Image (cartoon, rainbow, N blue to C red):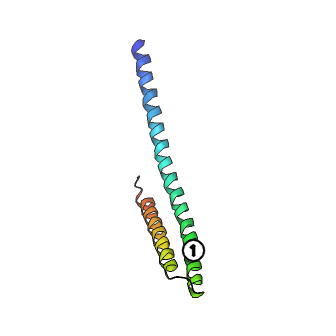
Amino acid sequence: MAEAVGKRDRQADSSRSLLLGELIGHDVHVTDRVSALISAFGILASTGLLADAVRDYRSGASALWIVAGAVIFLSALYTLVRDVRRLRTGQAT
């Protein structure tokens, strides 16, 4: 009788750990998707900043604004590409 109870407890523990492992695995995919979504919004924001920098440059502002806008845009683009690749391959960080 005691062996049957011990076996049942071990099976329950292993099924709980399996469920927890699946839950953690799904959470990683959700966070990767959220990260890619945030990166997409970063592209939108950096495009707006770059457009404003070009507009200001045409109005007589320093060319450094265009350089700064381009650097911000390229870093946002790199982040989006990295997040999309992570989603496609299914890698966790």
Residue at 57% from the left image edge and 87% from the top image edge: 60
- Up/down of 22 relative to 80, above or below: above
Give the tally of numbered discs: 1
Residue 6 in percent (x, y) is at 41, 18
Residue at 44% from the left image edge and 22% from the top image edge: 9
Q: Nearer the viewer, residue 74 or 89?
A: 74
Residue 54 in percent (x, y) is at 56, 82
Q: Nearer the viewer, residue 19 or 58?
A: 58
Apparent side of residue 63 relative to residue 2 in the rendered image (left or right):
right
Q: Can you tell which quarter of the image residue 90 is in?
A: bottom left
Three-letter amino acid code at the position of disc 1: Leu
Q: Nearer the viewer, residue 18 or 24?
A: 24
**Which residue has dot 1 on it?**
49
Viewport quadrant of the N terminus:
top left
Residue at 49% from the left image edge and 71% from the top image edge: 72
Residue at 42% from the left image edge and 31% from the top image edge: 14
Apparent side of residue 16 relative to residue 60 in the rendered image (left or right):
left
Q: Can you tell which quarter of the image residue 47 is in?
A: bottom right
Residue 33 in percent (x, y) is at 52, 57
- Up/down of 2 relative to 19, above or below: above
- Up/down of 46 relative to 61, above or below: above
Q: Secondary structure at mark 1?
A: helix
